[in-house]
Structure formats: C-alpha cells, structure tokens
Image (cartoon, rainbow, N blue to C red):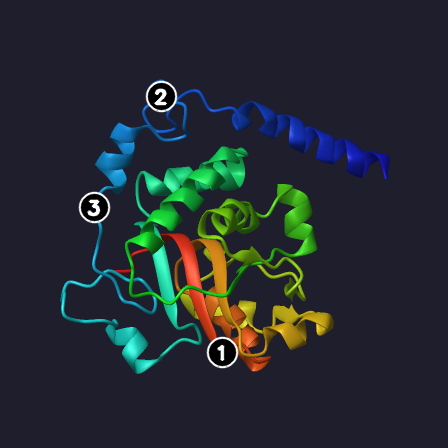
Amino acid sequence: MFQTLLSRTRQWWARLPAALPCSCTLCGSDSPAALCDACRARFFGQRRHRCTRCAMPLEDKASKECGDCLKHAPAFDATIVASDYAPPADQLVLALKFGNRLELAGLFAGMLHDALMNTPSLELPQRLIATPLGPQRLMERGFNQALEIAKPLSRRVGLALDTKLVLRQRETQAQALLHPDARRKNIRGAFGIRPEAIDRLRGLHVGIVDDVITTGETLNELATTLKRFGAARVTNLVFARTVQK
C-alpha cells in the first residue's frame, strides 16, 4: 500500500514541473503555451485531404475514402486527425506519453477541436470515450494519455465524456512492438462494455479519443465492440495519423 502511494506521488511530482509551460516544446522560445504560434503555423498549418473513414491522406481530391476502406470497411464510420504522425508531431506524442508532459494533452485537444471545426460536414458524436488502458499499463505509466486528451476536448466541444462505458478486459502487448499482421490477433476481444452502461449505449453515436492511429486495429476492435452492444455510429478523434507507405 505504502509503495503504491509512494510510486504515485513520485509520478505526480515528476509531472509537476511540466504543468506550467513557459517555453515552446519544439523551438524553446518563450511561450505561454506548449507550442508557440510560429511553430504551430510552420508545422501544423497545412490541412491535407484525407479518407473520411480512416484519415489516410489522399492525393485524389475527389475521393472520399481510400482503397483499403472501400475494400475492407472498418467498424468505425469516420476519423478526424489533427496531424500526421511524423516529425515533429511524433516527438510531441512521445513527450506526452513517456515524458510526462501532460500540458501537451491540452494542446492536442485544442488542435483536434480546430480540426473538428474545419470539418463542418462531420456529424458530431453524442458522447466521448477514451481508449482504455489495461490496469498494468496504467500503473506503469501513471495516466492514460487518451483520457488526458479527452478531458479538455470534451469541454471544448461541449460533449459529455463517459469514463464508465468501456473497459479493457485483458492486458495486451504494445501494438507498436508487433508486426502489422499480429496486431489484429493481439487486440481481439480486449474490450468490453460495462453491464450497467449497455442501455445508454444503444443507438448512440460514440466518439473515441486517442493519441495515434497506425493500422487502426485497436480503434476497429473498440468500434466493433461498441456496435456489437448497440452503438449506432463511431467516430475516431485522434491527434496523429501514421502515414503508411
């Protein structure tokens, strides 16, 4: 008990200095926010035409979905992202995830909010959830980065955040460490719906908040679970999209 409390205290203390940003995370210049206006305009000012379902960039401006989604439609219906998972966005994600830079979660939420506002045709979800972590991963990291992004995002868009809807039923290996072919098997059956939440899930349009989408297997499995229990529509709200080649 004491060791657990001590560990959590150390994690909190390690995050405390990062809670008061006074310089830009990327260029180091004085900035009241985690990202200065110059770096935001330089690295995140350009919008890309993307597949409406998985957010993969598309060269054909007339296309709405990529070839993979047309051939094998995932369980989710739409995906909104703020950036590609490429330098320097990838470094920001790693700083949040492994560097305890929790103020970056608010930055990601703000950029996702802007991406949503720039997609007027998108049907907004009725409720938000965060991709859940397993208990072991949560204890190791000390926080769920998806949930930390979802909290300020829910306030910005005025949508309720439901933290009692889904759960991680079992621990899985980190998807990033696996070959793409093994990711689907690794994540299969990992999520469940809390029994007391089934009634409020039926007919609901759910928004899943996460930090990165790569192959989409985790989000697809979560969307599959939500729809199995009655969700009508699932939209992913993810900070960064890995561009596969």
Residue 95's spot in the image, x, y percent?
46, 36
Confirm whether residue 182 shows in the render: no
Residue type pointed to by label 1: Ala
The residue that label 3 is drawn on is 46
Residue beneath disc 1: 232
Q: For residue 228, what is the image quadrant?
A: bottom right
Is label 1 in contact with label 2 (beta carbons under 8 Å)?
Answer: no
Report helix, strand or loop for mark 1. loop
Measuring from the top left, give residue 89's x and y in whole percent: 35, 42
Nearest to the eye among marks 3 and 2: give it.
3
Q: CA distance from mark 1 to mark 3?
A: 32 Å
Quadrant for the C terminus, please.
bottom left
Q: Earlier in the sequence, mark 3 or mark 2?
A: 2
Q: Is residue 163 above or below residue 235?
A: above
Residue under the point 28% across and 54% down: 118
Badge nearest the viewer, 1 or 2: 1
In the picture of the structure, the residue carrying the numbered disc 2 is 28
Crowd tier of the residue under label 2, counting other residues whose Cα lies within 10 Å: few below 14, some 14–19, many 20 or above: few
N-term mark: 1 or 2: 2
For mark 2, give the secondary structure.
Answer: loop
Q: Nearer the viewer, residue 101 or 201?
A: 201
Relative image position of residue 179 (x, y in whole percent)? 43, 63
Q: Amino acid at mark 3?
A: Gln
